[in-house]
Image: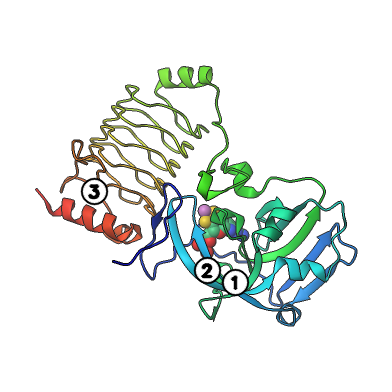
């Protein structure tokens, strides 16, 4: 049998030939003439166009992509310039301790790393993947690729590289609570929960989560039938073993949430983001998952004593199932055909 190197904890292989587009979709306001600026604590600030980037030493390396929403794509061959070689030309000053990457597009998406770490990891300014130019959908013509970190540290549509003395939290790190160190082997997905224990106790009593920011909330085992969680932010929330019949999760962000063993009969998830969420061992009869985005979600029971209950009454968009990992897709399709 073929042996594969192990994946970091909680990650699964994405389907062959599938590369999910995550985060910002292609921005509309990209420049006609692409340039990458190197600024901040450097002795020679410079602006590189694509020709100037191509004139620097080129390298190729295989990088394992690990998205925080639990899909991985090991061994992707990226080609471009190593950050180290690019910065050599610009003369980093001794006070420079962090590197911040800023993207084109109206939200000026950004992320940052300690400079020494970024260099040691072999971070690259990539222009090709698998021998072809990076497509716009995947951050082309120029994106950052940071090996050994969750993929949110790999910025698409690179506009500016800034060396700084102090760290400035990036977009996902501040907006979604993603961990700033982002080491997949240590499973550094999220920072500490958004609420204190006392606040959690209060909000659990109300059974009204609608529109609230409740990242990483621990609801484990609480009676929450009929919960109103419409448009709530519930990334990484723990709903294991919760009675949640008839709960409303329309438009909620449930990325990486845990529903193992939950009773979700009649619950609705339309327009919800359940990327990376775990439904293994949940009761999903009469549950409506149409319009939910499903990349990296898991349904197969891991414990034979507690099967996932799902049948023809569970509603999915057929096309959305393609976003699942192959074994998961096969499992769900088989259950949906059963009576
Ligand atoms: N400019 C920009 N870069 C970004 C993001 C983004 O939203 N905007 N999302 C990050 C996240 S969370 C991931 S997982 C990867 C996804 O890259 P892909 O769409 O090529 O798979 O890009 C990262 N870089
Ligand atoms: Mo991500």
Please provide percent x and percent y for residue 122.
65, 63
Q: Secondary structure at mark 3?
A: loop
Q: Which residue is mark 2?
A: 137
- Image point (56%, 43%), residue name: 176
Q: Secondary structure at mark 1?
A: loop
**Cα distance between the residues tagged 3 and 2:** 29 Å
Is residue 23 visible from the viewing direction of this image?
Answer: no
* Outermost left residue: 339
23 over 134 or under it: above or below: above
In the image, taking residue 279 as reference, residue 256 lies left or right, namely right
- Image point (79%, 66%), residue name: 87
Q: Which residue is mark 1?
A: 140
168 over 12 or under it: above or below: above
Q: Does the closest atom of ligand 1 sit within 8 Å of the Cβ of label 2?
A: yes
When asked about the image quadrant of residue 280, the answer is top left
Please provide percent x and percent y for residue 12.
38, 54
Say which mark, if any, is on residue 315.
Answer: 3
Say if mark 1 contacts mark 2, CB within 8 Å. Answer: yes
Q: Secondary structure at mark 2?
A: helix
Say which mark, if any, is on residue 9.
Answer: none
Please provide percent x and percent y for residue 119.
71, 60
């Amino acid at each position: 049998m073929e042996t594969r190197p192990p994946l970091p904890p909680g990650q699964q292989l994405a389907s062959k030939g599938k590369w999910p587009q995550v985060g910002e979709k292609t921005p509309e306001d990209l420049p006609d003439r692409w340039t990458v600026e190197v600024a901040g604590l450097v002795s020679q600030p410079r602006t590189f166009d694509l020709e100037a980037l191509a004139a620097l030493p080129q390298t190729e390396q295989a990088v394992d992509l690990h998205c925080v929403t639990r899909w991985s794509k090991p061994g992707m061959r990226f080609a471009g310039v190593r950050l180290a070689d690019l910065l050599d030309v610009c003369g980093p000053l001794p006070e420079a301790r962090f590197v911040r990457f800023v993207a084109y597009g109206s939200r000026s998406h950004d992320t940052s790393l300690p400079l020494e770490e970024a260099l040691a990891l072999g971070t690259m300014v990539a222009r090709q993947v698998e021998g072809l130019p990076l497509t716009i959908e995947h951050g082309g013509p120029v994106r950052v690729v940071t090996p050994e970190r969750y993929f949110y540290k790999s910025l698409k549509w690179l506009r500016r590289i800034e060396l700084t003395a102090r760290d400035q939290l990036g977009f996902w790190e501040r907006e979604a609570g993603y961990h700033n160190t982002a080491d997949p082997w240590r499973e550094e997905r999220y920072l500490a929960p958004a609420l204190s224990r006392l606040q959690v106790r209060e909000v659990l009593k109300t059974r009204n989560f609608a529109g609230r920011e409740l990242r990483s909330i621990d609801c484990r085992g609480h009676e929450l039938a009929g919960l109103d969680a419409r448009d709530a932010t519930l990334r990484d929330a723990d709903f294991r073993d919760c009675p949640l019949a008839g709960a409303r999760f329309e438009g909620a962000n449930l990325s990486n949430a845990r529903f193992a063993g939950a009773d979700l009969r009649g619950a609705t998830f339309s327009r919800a983001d359940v990327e990376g969420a775990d439904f293994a061992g949940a009761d999903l009869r009469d549950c409506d998952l149409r319009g939910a985005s499903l990349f990296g979600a898991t349904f197969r029971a891991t414990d034979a004593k507690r099967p996932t209950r799902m049948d023809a009454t569970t509603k999915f968009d057929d096309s959305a199932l393609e976003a699942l990992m192959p074994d998961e897709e096969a499992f769900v399709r088989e259950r949906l055909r059963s009576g």
